[in-house]
Amino acid sequence: MSNKVNDARIMRIQRVLNDIQKAVNQIPRGNISQSAVRRIDDNKLVLQVIASNDAELAPVANKVSQAVDVFKSFARKFNAGNNADVEARDFERLMNEIAEMTV
């Protein structure tokens, strides 16, 4: 596989993580926009394609995909005013694991 293809996949994963960070930054405002959640969710297919086509990046893509799912659940509960502590802890754990994998 060419380095350009691998670099593009890494950049795509990084964009998903950046989109997640932008949504996380909305938390202090008391509401996470639906467009931010949708933008993150739209990337699930891309992550699945990367995971199925790149054995080296599959673990990271799969972990980011899990973080997307947990964040969506968190956003839904948070926006509804419900307790989302479990999702917040799971999300934080996944993001720490992703950080360790990408160092």
Image (cartoon, helix red, strand yellow):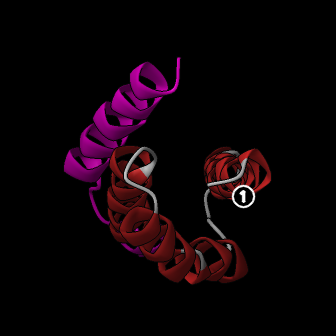
Relative depth, front residue between 83 and 33? 33
Q: Secondary structure at mark 1?
A: helix
Relative depth, front residue between 99 and 75? 99
Amino acid type for the residue under numbered disc 1: Val
Relative depth, front residue between 90 and 84? 90
For the question of whether residue 75 can be seen, the reply is no
Q: Main secondary structure of the magenta part?
A: helix
- Tell me residue 41's x, y (percent): 53, 78
- Tell me residue 60's x, y (percent): 42, 45
Residue located at (29% from left, 32% from top): 93
Q: Is residue 92 above or below residue 25?
A: above
- Name the residue that disc number 1 marks: 5
Q: Quadrant of residue 68?
A: bottom left
Whether 69 is among the magenta residues is no
- Tell me residue 64's x, y (percent): 43, 53
Give the residue furthest to the front: 1
Q: Quadrant of residue 78?
A: bottom left
- Tell me residue 71's x, y (percent): 42, 60
Q: Taking 10 as reference, is 65 left or right?
A: left
Residue located at (25% from left, 43% from top): 90
Q: Is residue 102 above or below residue 52?
A: above
For the question of whether residue 4 can be seen, the reply is yes
For the residue carrying disc 1, how many other residues have a C-alpha within 10 Å: few (<14), some (14-19), or many (20+)? few
- Give the magenta range: 76-103
How many discs appear? 1
Q: Taking 13 as reference, is 103 left or right?
A: left
Whether 81 is among the magenta residues is yes
Residue located at (69% from left, 72% from top): 36
Residue located at (66% from left, 57% from top): 9
Q: Quadrant of residue 95?
A: top left
